[in-house]
Amino acid sequence: MKTYYSKGRDGHQMETTKELPDGKTLKLSTSKRGNGGGVSTYATVGISSDNCFSFVIFQDFSKMILTEKTRVTEKAVRLQHQQALDNLEALESDIADHYAVLAKKEFA
């Protein structure tokens, strides 16, 4: 699992990537929310290779898991990202359930 913090044009942001057992990658991203301000954390599952990350819309797991209307500071971003990491086990369970339902639909 790798976590990165940066402050760029769009402000403070953190990203964690974790390899999943099925060869896919979970990406947690925490940053400024585009609609109305605040901080949001998104979980997205896809395929990671070299410096590329790709996922299939409406098929791969993608969900906003935390959001808070607050001033976007480094402390706020780090705190919310840590909250997401603290709930990683439950998130991985949701991801497994998502792909189990998807597999049933493919064989139906």
Image: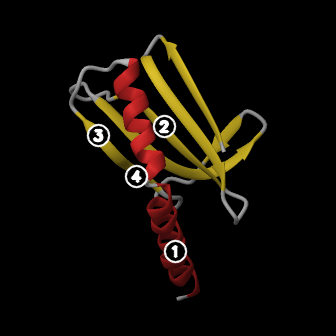
Residue 31 seen in render? no
> Residue at horizontal 70%, vertical 65%?
22
SS category of the residue bearing label 2: strand
SS category of the residue bearing label 3: strand
Q: Say which amino acid is labelled 1.
A: Leu
Mark 4: few/some/many CA within 10 Å (<14, 14-19, 20+): few
Q: Which mark is residue 67?
A: 3
44 left or right of 24 in image: left
The residue to which callout 1 is attached is: 102
Is residue 59 positioned above or below 101 on the image? above
SS category of the residue bearing label 4: strand
CA separation, marks 3 and 4?
A: 11 Å
* Image coords of residue 91 (percent x, y): 46, 59
How many labels, in total?
4
Which numbered disc, 3 or 1, marks the residue that appears first in the sequence?
3
Which image quarter holds the N terminus?
top right
> Residue at horizontal 50%, vertical 61%?
89
> Residue at horizontal 29%, vertical 40%?
67
Q: Say which amino acid is labelled 3.
A: Thr
- Colour mode? secondary structure
Nearer to the camera, 63 or 55: 63
CA separation, marks 3 and 1?
A: 26 Å
Q: Residue 63 carries which label?
A: 4
Is residue 12 positioned above or below 80 on the image? above
Circles 3 and 1 in contact, beta carbons < 8 Å:
no
The residue to which callout 2 is attached is: 29
